[in-house]
Image (spheres, helix red, strand yellow):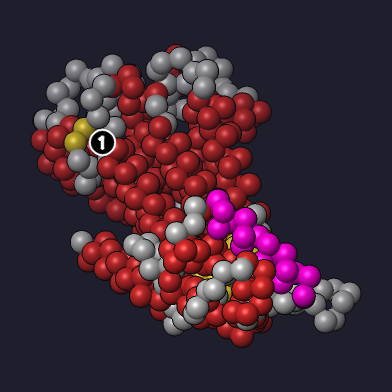
Amino acid sequence: MAKLWGGRFTQDSSSLLDSFNASIAFDQELWEYDIAGSKVHAKMLLSIGVLKRSEYESIINGLQSIAERIKKDEFEFKIVDEDIHMAIESALIDLVGEAGKKLHTARSRNDQVALDFRMYVLDYNRKIRLKILDLMDTILEVAKEHTDTIMPGMTHLQHAQPINFGFHLVAWCVSLKRDYQRFSDSFERNNFLPLGVGALAGTPYGNDREMMAKDLGFKAPTLNAMDTVSERDFALDMLYDISMLLMHISRFSEELVLWSSYEFKFISISDAYSTGSSIMPQKKNPDVPELLRGKSGRVFGNLMGLLSVMKGLPLAYNKDTQEDKEGVFDSVKTTMISLEILKEVLASMRIYPENMLKMAKIGHLTATDLADFLVREKQLPFREAHHITGEVVAFAEKKGVDISELSEDEIFQITSLKLVGIEKILDIKTSMNARDSLGGTSTRRTKEQIDDLKNWIDEKKNG
């Protein structure tokens, strides 16, 4: 079958080349964007006098017919067409004849693929942002119920200070907010129309790129034709943003795995989102968070893959950039399902506040409160207060109790300091609520943080 570009060739393409060269197996994902771009391009050609009204209408009707066939799974994607652009153009010519041959005037596959792929990336940028907001909403609904649920806050995976569970979940949401903002920034940076720049140097037809940008929802046309067909920064931005998001999700997932173990037993993941063992009938495995944790490596690989493709390419377009899409498609699909399933896991998990409190009473979490008390009430330098507190912790360790269980008299025997009211200061809940500075873990401050995030989410959803 003759290629649409084959005029200067005297031999047919080898079937091996067809298989090696073709991208139709994966870039058919872009069909909706290709047709949308072609419709607007046809409208532009009509406006500059390249197409007659009858030809324009014939092309639009033909493109619509092709779209309907694809939706109904009645369209045959052929490897000889190489890519989605040639597949649709060939089908259009078959449908409408000579008018279809005029559609490619004043454009190249170079700017056409840059358009289709960019539209896909921007479209899924929006969709991912909405799913991030939905996930944050779910997390905050759980957090709102647990602003008094005390758990051990950890550093180095060692018990550090008492916090509430809601505060911990808010920390997740703050990182997700940054993810949302990262996607939003990338969207603004890349929301420029590539179409109409031709192969690399512009066209002699006087393309109305401003009109096409407006019709396709772009902020404006791109500035430089050569850069436009060469760069894939928009795809790399998408892969980087996804990598950051999945890195955060991986960290959340690690905590879900820990918390669902018998050693912690802070939560139980719903049976609907757990799996069993083929040999050990008692097992209930946290496979969803484990898979989410693993997905981060997959999307990191896609980012590094495209960086490696792009790093040595001269201007302008090179066929290497055909390798830009599959990693992005994979990362986008991975992200969409990851956000959805994590939301469902969190909404359906069971929480055990009593186990969190029990763990908070291990590890001397209120030791810092004793040091702070000595600084405030006895005017001791913090380093001296730190040393005295260490001696009290050592005594509690020897006695086999937590520091919060020591009496005022016992602390007096160790320190020779009369610390009236210290038993209340060392109480776990008092300690948690004492951290009442802006951004702190107290119940009051946690509720403020939840309200602040909820207001921000509502603004983004309604803005």
Q: Say which quarter of the image contains residue 59.
A: top left
Amino acid at pointer 1: Leu
Q: Residues within 10 Å of mark 1 (few under 14, many from 20)?
A: many
- Specify whether residue 38 is in view: no
> Is residue 238 visible to the viewer in this orientation of the structure?
yes
**Residue 66 lies in magenta, yes or no?**
no
| Residue at the spot of label 1 | 193
Give the quarter of the figure containing the C terminus: bottom left
Name the residue nearer the viewer: 167 or 410.
410
Question: Which residue is situated farthest in the right direction here?
Answer: 279
Q: Which residues are magenta?
A: 383-400
Q: Position of residue 167 (x, y in %)?
A: 46, 69
| Residue depicted at 36% across the width and 25% down the height | 229
Q: Nearest the camera: 127 or 189?
A: 189
Q: Is residue 286 above or below residue 6?
A: below
Q: Nearer the viewer, residue 390 or 282?
A: 390
Q: In the image, residue 223 lies at what x, y percent?
A: 23, 25
Above or below for 202 versus 137: above
Which secondary structure dominates the residues rendered in magenta? helix
